[in-house]
Image (spheres, rainbow, N blue to C red):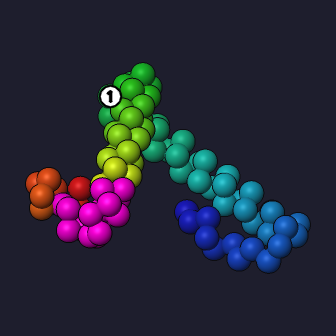
Amino acid sequence: PSLRSCQPDGANEETLRCEIKELKLKDLALDQEITQLLSEGYSLEELEKHISLLHEYNDIKDAGQMLLGKLAVIRGVTTKQLYPEYDLELSD
């Protein structure tokens, strides 16, 4: 479920109720996904380790993107122009 279906028009009570309802739906969907993964043989420890590794990967990727951005500024080019030089794909 998307949290975007509530159109915020300030912090009124109806908007907050709508957001709470959507968060509860998202929580339920995540619980169902966890239950499905557990039924497929995954353990909570394995899932937590996988999530931890994804966070680490994202942090490293963010640092690399930041460095490419700074290098692009120094060279006066776009980040996209640096990708071939470092054998990177645009989808990286």
Give the residues in magenta.
69-83
Q: Is residue 14 above or below residue 50?
A: below
To which quarter of the image does residue 68 belong? bottom left
Q: Is residue 2 above or below residue 39?
A: below
Residue furthest to the top: 45
Q: Is residue 14 above or below residue 26?
A: below
Residue 56: x and y in percent read 39, 35
Q: Is residue 8 above or below residue 28?
A: below
Q: Is residue 85 magenta?
A: no
44 left or right of 23 in image: left
To which quarter of the image does residue 47 belong? top left
Q: Quadrant of the N terminus?
A: bottom right
**Identity of the residue drawn at 35% across and 40% down:** 60
Q: Nearer the viewer, residue 49 or 73?
A: 73
Residue 10: x and y in percent read 83, 73
**Identity of the residue drawn at 63% across and 73% down:** 5
48 left or right of 6 in image: left
Residue furthest to the right: 13
Q: Is residue 83 visible?
A: yes
Residue 92: x and y in percent read 23, 56
Residue 24: x and y in percent read 67, 52
**Identity of the residue drawn at 26% across and 70% down:** 77
Does dot 1 land on a helix, a strand or a loop? loop
Q: Which residue is mark 1?
A: 41
